[in-house]
Image (cartoon, rainbow, N blue to C red):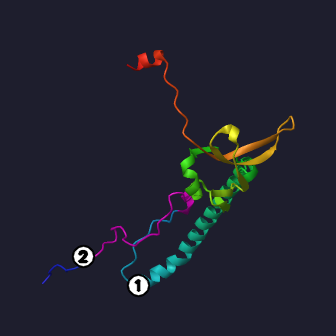
Amino acid sequence: TNAPSPTPTKSASAPSTQATPAQPPSAPAQLSPAPAQAPSPSAAPESVAKADAPEFEAQLLTALRAIWRELREIKKLLEAQQQAQPSPTPAEVRAPNLRRLLSEYPSFNWDEIGAKVLSADEDGATAVAWGGHVFVRRTNPKFGAEVWFSRAAGRSEDGEISYERLITFATLPEAEPLPRTVRDRLR
């Protein structure tokens, strides 16, 4: 007549299986909840949850306040770092002075270098915007078959106008023959 019960019963010494709220890894040690005590067999589960709710809410609020303080401190540190190393303004960014083949000029993809075509003629772009500045097409017979985009960047110490180039389109220069001493070492 004393058949075993199909569901096991908890003894008073068994650990509680009641879920405890997870603590974030960086939460202060004083915020860890007290060990849960096993509910008495006569207590209803709802009454246990209702009794623990105010304590849990107080711990949660304390943890959230600590996180908020840490976030404010991180924000202050990031702002101080940005003030110490300001980002370059468009005037401080130098044009890259890129080189491409002259044959690429008529159909060059200006988006590839982050430039926007402002005007063009039948030969190709005549003015482009890059880095907050306008670069205009230039050419000069004394430099050979070259097309470049440049802008006046200011005056040098001696009063000369200084220019910066965004890109130069030119024919491929002929390679110089290697000296005999270099050829000998290659073999």
Residue 153 vertical placement versus 54 (above, below):
above
What residue is shown with label 2? 8
In the image, 56: left or right of 140? left
Q: Residue at x 69, y 41 (%)?
A: 141
Quadrant assignment, res 4: bottom left
In the image, 157: left or right of 148? right
Q: Residue at x 72, y 44 (%)?
A: 164
User: How many marks can you see?
Assistant: 2
Front one among 58 and 109: 109
Label pair 1/2, CB-CB below 8 angstroms:
no
Q: Quadrant of the C terminus?
A: top left
Give x and y (percent) for residue 54. Answer: 56, 77
Q: For the residues marked 1 and 2, what is the alpha-carbon distance in whole angstroms?
A: 18 Å
Residue 160 vertical placement versus 81 (above, below):
above
User: Is residue 82 covered in magenta?
Assistant: no
Q: Quadrant of the N terminus?
A: bottom left
What residue is shown with label 1? 44
Q: Is residue 89 visible?
A: no
In the image, 123: left or right of 134? left
Q: Earlier in the sequence, mark 1 or mark 2?
A: 2
Q: Chief secondary structure of the magenta span?
A: loop
Which disc number belongs to residue 125?
A: none
| Magenta residues, start to end | 9-31
Q: Residue at x 36, y 71 (%)?
A: 17
Residue type at the position of mark 1: Ala
Residue type at the position of mark 2: Pro
Give x and y (percent) for residue 119. Answer: 69, 62
